[in-house]
Image (cartoon, helix red, strand yellow):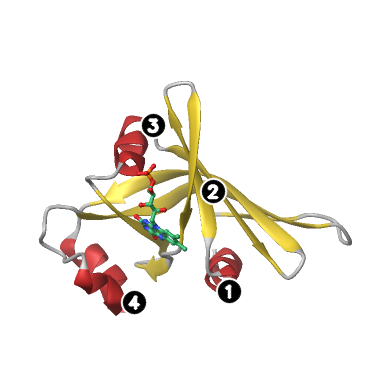
Amino acid sequence: MEKTAAFLKEAGTYYLATTDGDQPRVRPFGTVNIFDGKLYIQTGKSKDVSKQLHANPKAEICAFKDGSWLRIACELIEDDRREARESMLNAYPQLRAMYSEDDGNTEVFYIKNATATFSSFTAAPEVETF
Ligand SMILES: Cc1cc2nc3c(=O)[nH]c(=O)nc-3n(C[C@H](O)[C@H](O)[C@H](O)COP(=O)(O)O)c2cc1C
């Protein structure tokens, strides 16, 4: 998990794919936070991405950095604990301009059943599962 978290943070932006019925949906994301031994992302309940994850938690994440790319096949599961939201907002204080722990919108999801594959054109793929 640590290698995956470091790659996502260093990449800065990653792309999160969800399913919307039979239609794939993908968008840029940036939040990454380790809390209570799990890797979390943040979004808002008002967003379509949130609704899609609640309907179907299967997701893929893709990021690219320095000639290498990472693909994470996973499930994203909401953690409704206030302290999980607080940890995320403390890691990204700039988000507090739009979000707060108790606004009824902010939510965090942790990555479950992850297969994270690190690839490049010059080396064999490496896999991290968590
Ligand atoms: C670089 C970048 C990083 C972003 N990071 C996040 C994020 O971590 N969480 C989030 O909810 N939205 C983030 N956004 C905004 C989402 O991409 C945007 O709200 C998107 O429309 C959400 O997907 P949806 O329209 O399918 O709900 C980011 C946007 C950019 C450009």
Labels 1 and 2: the sequence-earlier one = 1
Residue where numbered disc 4 is placed: 91
Q: Position of residue 6 (x, y in %)?
A: 56, 72
Quadrant of the rendering where the C terminus is positioned: bottom right
Q: Quadrant of ligand 1?
A: bottom left
CA–CA distance in space, label 1 to label 4: 15 Å
Q: Residue at x 58, y 64 (%)?
A: 4
Asked if disc 3 and disc 4 are in contact, CB closer than 8 Å, the reply is no
Q: Secondary structure at mark 1?
A: helix
Circle count: 4
Query: Disc 1 or disc 3, which is closer to the eye?
Result: 1
> Callout 3, which amino acid?
Asn
Query: Disc 3 or disc 2, which is closer to the eye?
Result: 3
As drawn, the label of residue 117 is: none
Question: Can you tell me whether the CB of the residue at mark 2 lies under 8 Å from the nearest atom of ligand 1?
Answer: no
> Callout 2, which amino acid?
Ala
